[in-house]
Structures are given as C-alpha cells and as structure tokens.
Image (cartoon, rainbow, N blue to C red):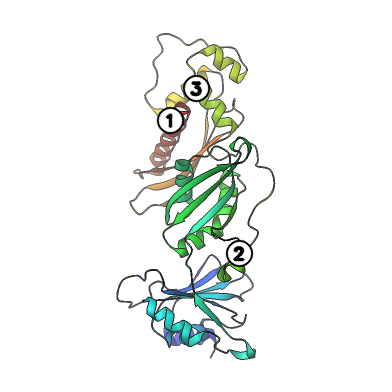
Amino acid sequence: MTSENWLESTSITLTQVNGQRKYGGPPTGWRGPAPGPGCEVFISSIPRDVFEDCLIPLFQTVAPLYEFRLMMNFSGQNRGFAYAKYGRPADAEAAIRALHLHPLRGGMCLIVKMSTEKRQLCLGELPAGVSEEALLTVLRMVSDGVRGVTVRVAGPRGKATSALVFYSSHYAASMAKKVLVQAFKKQYGVSISVRWFSGSSKPRHDESEEEGALACPGPKPVGQALLTAASFQLARSAFRDPHPQLFSRVVGGPAPQASSGEAVPHDAVGRLRRLCELYGLGLPIYDVRYHHTSADGFLCVSYSVLVPGLPMPFCGVAQVLPGPSTNTTEEEARRTAAEQVLKAMSRA
C-alpha cells in the first residue's frame, strides 16, 4: 500500500510545517488535556524511504498518539529522525521498552529514547546594546510561544551580546530555531547565530543531526541595525538635547532657530516631522509592513523610519488596532511608529 492509499484509507491528515510533517497535536477525536513533560520519545535511525504509513501504525500499537512529527528535507526524503508524543509519560516509557532496537527492512533498527524536549535557544552575534524589552518584542513578532528572554553581555566594552530565549514548548522552540536566522536577516539586516541551549558542550543525540552551522557570517549592513547602534545613539542624543549648539555639533550643521510663536503638533507624526524640519534633516520616510494578527485582534507590524539627515533608520515592531479601512490602519501604524521613535529618543 502506498502512502497516498494509506492516508485515504485511514483519514489521517499530515501537515507540512517548516521542514517537518506533522500528524495530530491533537488528532481528531482526542479526549483529555494536552500532554505534559515526559510524554515524547525521540526516534532515530529511520531509513530514508520509510514514512508515516509505517511509523505511525507501529507507534500506535503501544498507545494512542497525541502527535507524530517526521523531519523532512526538500527532496521528499525523511531526515532519519522523528518525534512521537503520547498522552501519558507511562505510554512514552512503554514505547521505549517495546520499540527500541525494533528491526525495520534493510537490517536497520530504530533507536527510541526519551526526548528531553528542550525549550531554550541561545542567540549569538546580537547588536551591542540591544535591550531585553526590545529583543522580546521582536522575538514575539517572528516566532510563537516566547515566554521570556535574558540578554548576556561579555567581551571588551560589552560588545559580545547574546541572549537566552525561553519558549513554551519544545515544538515552539524548534520552529523558532528554523526561522530566526532568516527572519532577523530579512527584516532587520542582522546576522545572528541560533543554537540549542545546553549545560554541556556535548550535543544531545536528538539534536546532533539537525544542529547545523546556523551563524550567518559577514558584516552587519549599515542602515539596517536592530533597534540599536550608531543611528539610535546619534538621533536620541540629538533630539533630547535642549541646547541647539550641542545638537549642531552632533549632526554637523548650524544651530536652528525656532519661531517662538509656532505651535507644536499634537500628533506623533506631526511632532516628528516638525523636529526633522527644525533641524533640517528632511521629512521622515516610513516603511510599515504587516506580519500577522495576534489572538487578541491586534495587527503586528514592523516599521522602519528613515530620517534622511541621519546615517541609519529607526527599526522596530508595534501592535495596532485595525481601522475601518486600509488607509486608516496604515495611518495608525505610522502614528505608533512615530511615537515609539520619539519615546526611544527621549529614553536614551
């Protein structure tokens, strides 16, 4: 029986998600709560031409499966390992006893062990000076299940910045591990490295095959730094400085003279525009991009605000309520971006 015929005869649905094919989580008709820790087993030494039509029925002989995930590559072959999650820790232990070293065709035997279900990722090569608050906001924009983050600073003058990110589940952390490098590179022009956190330098069995060299070498492109670096320091200090002469020295131009009777705009976009006009920096240019809608109805967007007279743009993320039309939603996103830029300048 082919895999296609097996799917039709069993009514099982498989979902392709970021390099893995998933069944369940939960499956149709599942009763009971979601499994807790200790319910998942890691399966390795799977022949590359063996798929769910063989593996799922095999692991269902022990107990009902809550979820089964087979790692896949772009050629359509499996990557040699998978994860099976049961409803109870006792079922996972029974699967190890029953199926560890289970023989398959070609003389290969399955390796079945308890999954440690790691939920922490280490991010390296982050921009110097990035705050935990800013990084947490960005991570929640590009990955699901982020519970918290701890930024670590080391090296001379604190230039080596890394972070430990805590996720709600191993699955959420695994999905994030697959997308964070490209997401940071594409959205912010920042090359970072991502790896599993481990208290030991020795890799786990279930991560040795999927752990790769994820660092993206090369210089960080000027003009695309993440919420930090020279443009933020320059612009923040300039805009908060009450002394025009000092501001003039920072941006390299003559001190402006404001009209004493001129009203200050109340709208954040207007205030930012007025400041840029006052100091001859040119009108701000906004690039706002929609990412997704959160569970509470907010639109999650990323923004880049380029002030022509400054060397680098202000980049960040924000949540806005949807408006009655696309235009009003975009206006609200720009106002929110302008407010965050002004707040960032005043906090420095």
Residue name at image x 51 percent, y 26 percent: 236
Which secondary structure, mark 1? helix
Q: How dense is the environment of label 3, judged by Cα within 10 Å: few (below 14), some, or many (20 and up)?
A: some
User: x%, y% of residue 265?
Assistant: 39, 22
Q: How many marks?
A: 3
**Circle on res. 51:** none
As displayed, is residue 87 above or below residue 296? below
**Which sits earlier in the primary sequence, circle 3 or circle 1?**
3
Asked whether, in this view, residue 264 is left or right of residue 177, the answer is left
Q: Residue furthest front?
A: 200
Q: Give the Cα separation between the discs numbered 3 and 2.
A: 49 Å
Choose between 203 and 99: the one closer to the eye. Answer: 203
Q: How dense is the environment of label 1, judged by Cα within 10 Å: few (below 14), some, or many (20 and up)?
A: few
**Circle on res. 202:** 2
**Which sits earlier in the primary sequence, circle 3 or circle 2?**
2
Asked whether, in this view, residue 218 is left or right of residue 121, the answer is right
Circle 3/circle 2 CB separation < 8 Å: no
Residue name at image x 44 percent, y 34 percent: 340
**Which sits earlier in the primary sequence, circle 2 or circle 1?**
2
Q: Give the Cα separation between the discs numbered 3 and 1.
A: 11 Å
Amino acid type, mark 3: Phe
Which secondary structure, mark 3? helix
Instruction: Please state which of the two labelled residues, at mark 2 or mark 1, is closer to the viewer.
Output: 2
Residue picked out by circle 1: 343
Which secondary structure, mark 2? loop
Residue picked out by circle 3: 239
